[in-house]
Image: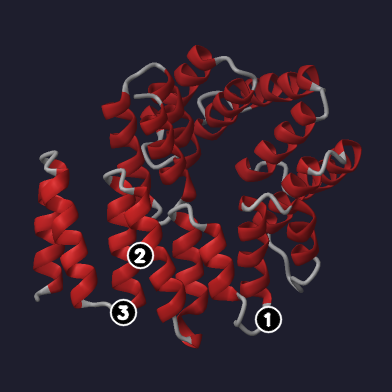
Amino acid sequence: MDKERALKEIQSNISRGNDRSASVQILELANCFSDDPYTLLTCASLLKTIGDDDGARSLAKRVSEKAKDEDRLEAAKGLRGIGFPAEAEKVLSAASDNDSVARERMRILFDMRDYIGSSKEYEKISEPTLEDTAAMIGAVSACREHDRAVRLAEDLLKEAPHDLTVQRCYCAALSAAGRSKDAGKFVKDNLKKNKDSPDADALASYYLWIEGKTASAGAYASKAVKADPGNVAAMEVLAYTLAEKGKLKEARIVAGAINEKDPGNPAVVRILDMCRASK
């Protein structure tokens, strides 16, 4: 079987809404390349896209069984990205420890709601990135250690005051701690200081979304995406607001754009799951 040709035919069927035909083709492709974890992962992702969660999970388990030592990290990232953290954790269980493995395991454990375990993995990273620290703070906040989470977020903000991921982390920590007014003031001040900044609008959309203000969140997200079509943070919130308003086709289109911009971004699966739940 010509894999590239088969994938094009599958994508064509999916784009035309022929999910049943696509499903058959996906399973045929998976069977033809049953020893290739990356092809199996691609097939699992495609099944997830058309809403066949059981089929996708079955292939995800096969990925965890077929992944070799050199494949483990990338396979785990892919599995987490399509919403199968338990299978991803199994893949990494036999991997040698290093910063990259600890970093991925931290995110996997968070998705499995093992927030304490996630925080402990952070401690194994010798050179944490801003994103690593923000993820750790999210785990601390999820453990309801709100005061500590806010202090850590404040320290991180001092280190990188203009980084959107850090700003989102700070707002989330404040909101979780019951300090929504403080988070709102931070967002408003940021908008004033950074007029016409897509990131400032993206931050506002994120804050308004977690506060349950869907209409306003969507407006700021749309503004950010219009100014910067590659702003993934704003695209994610925009898709959520579209799905909540019942505009499922539009939300899926945004999810596809996110996947094209940042393949494997877990937001894609969250958006698709939200669309299915909204039917």
Q: Residue at x 63, y 58 (%)?
A: 107
Q: Nearer the viewer, mark 3 or mark 1?
A: 3
Marks 3 and 2 sit apart, C-alpha to C-alpha, by: 11 Å
Q: Earlier in the sequence, mark 3 or mark 1?
A: 3
Instruction: Tell me if label 1 and label 2 are in contact, CB under 8 Å.
Output: no
Residue identifier under label 1 = 97
Q: Nearer the viewer, mark 3 or mark 2?
A: 2
Image spot of residue 42 (x, y percent): 30, 63
Q: Earlier in the sequence, mark 1 or mark 2?
A: 2
| Residue 36, disc | 3
Q: Secondary structure at mark 1?
A: loop
* Label 3 Cα crowd, 10 Å radius (few <14 / some 14-19 / many 20+): some
For the N terminus, the image quarter is bottom left
| Residue 59, disc | 2
Please say if 68 is above or below 102. below
Amino acid on which disc 1 is placed:
Asp
Image spot of residue 96 (x, y percent): 64, 85
For the C terminus, the image quarter is top left
Marks 3 and 1 sit apart, C-alpha to C-alpha, by: 24 Å
Amino acid on which disc 3 is placed:
Asp
